[in-house]
Image (cartoon, rainbow, N blue to C red):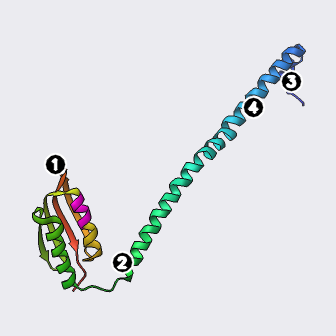
């Protein structure tokens, strides 16, 4: 290996032991750089890949479930406005009782909630989507101190 003149002027007068120590230090420095820039990041990715793989698998399973639900909804026969409104009214009475008031304006239904329990609201939303084919368009809800919900929900029914 040919060194520049300035380096050679410093290197040549060194004792063999000093040259060996400097070469060893340089080798350690190169190894540390290779480890820090190439090996350590690759090992980190390899260690975290199993957890990421499990997470992606869970997301895929959830997406497949949603796909099956969407296909089941598509396969259901078309439902008219009147039937949807009837089913929605009965589900509000059964699931939400006196905690909800419903106002119909064309194909939009505004539901006013007062202290509606969270579990009842979740079950009702699912039922309204599947049975009455009502799609939530807008929600202005606030959580009450008792754990219920106050506010309004605007749903769209199938067109007439």
Q: Which residue is identified by label 3?
A: 5
Residue 18 x %, y %:
84, 15
As displayed, is residue 111 above or below residue 10?
A: below
Q: Which residue is identified by label 2?
A: 73
Q: Is residue 118 magenta?
A: no
Label 4 vs label 2, nearer the camera:
2
Q: Are marks 3 and 1 in contact (CB under 8 Å)?
A: no
Mark 3 surroundings within 10 Å by alpha-carbon count, few (fewer than 14), some (14 through 19), many (20 or more): few
Mark 3 and mark 1 lie on one chain; the one further toward the N terminus is 3
Residue at mark 1 to residue at mark 2: CA–CA distance: 35 Å
Q: Which residue is identified by label 1?
A: 146
Residue at mark 3 to residue at mark 1: CA–CA distance: 83 Å
The part of the image, by quadrant, that contains residue 92 is bottom left
For the magenta stretch, what is the residue range? 119-124
As displayed, is residue 101 above or below residue 148?
A: below
Q: Are marks 3 and 4 in contact (CB under 8 Å)?
A: no
Residue at mark 2 to residue at mark 3: CA–CA distance: 81 Å
Residue at mark 3 to residue at mark 4: CA–CA distance: 23 Å
Mark 1 and mark 4 lie on one chain; the one further toward the N terminus is 4
Mark 3 and mark 4 lie on one chain; the one further toward the N terminus is 3
SS at badge 1: loop
The part of the image, by quadrant, that contains residue 7 is top right
Quick one: quadrant of the N terminus? top right
Label 1 vs label 4, nearer the camera:
1
Quick one: quadrant of the C terminus? bottom left
Residue 13 x %, y %:
89, 14
Label 3 vs label 1, nearer the camera:
1
């Amino acid at each position: 290996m040919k060194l520049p003149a300035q380096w050679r002027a410093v290197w040549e007068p060194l004792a063999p032991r000093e040259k060996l120590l400097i070469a060893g230090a340089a080798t350690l420095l190169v190894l540390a750089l290779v480890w820090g820039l190439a090996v350590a990041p690759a090992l980190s990715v390899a260690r975290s890949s199993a957890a990421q793989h499990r997470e992606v698998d869970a997301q895929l399973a959830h997406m497949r479930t949603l796909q099956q639900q969407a296909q089941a909804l598509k396969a259901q026969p078309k439902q008219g406005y009147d039937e949807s409104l009837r089913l929605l009214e009965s589900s509000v009475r059964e699931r939400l009782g006196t905690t909800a008031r419903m106002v119909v304006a064309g194909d939009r239904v505004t539901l006013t909630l007062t202290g509606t329990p969270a579990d009842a609201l979740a079950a009702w939303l699912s039922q309204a989507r599947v049975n009455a084919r009502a799609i939530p368009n807008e929600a202005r809800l606030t959580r009450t101190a008792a754990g219920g919900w106050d506010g309004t929900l605007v749903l769209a029914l199938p067109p007439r």
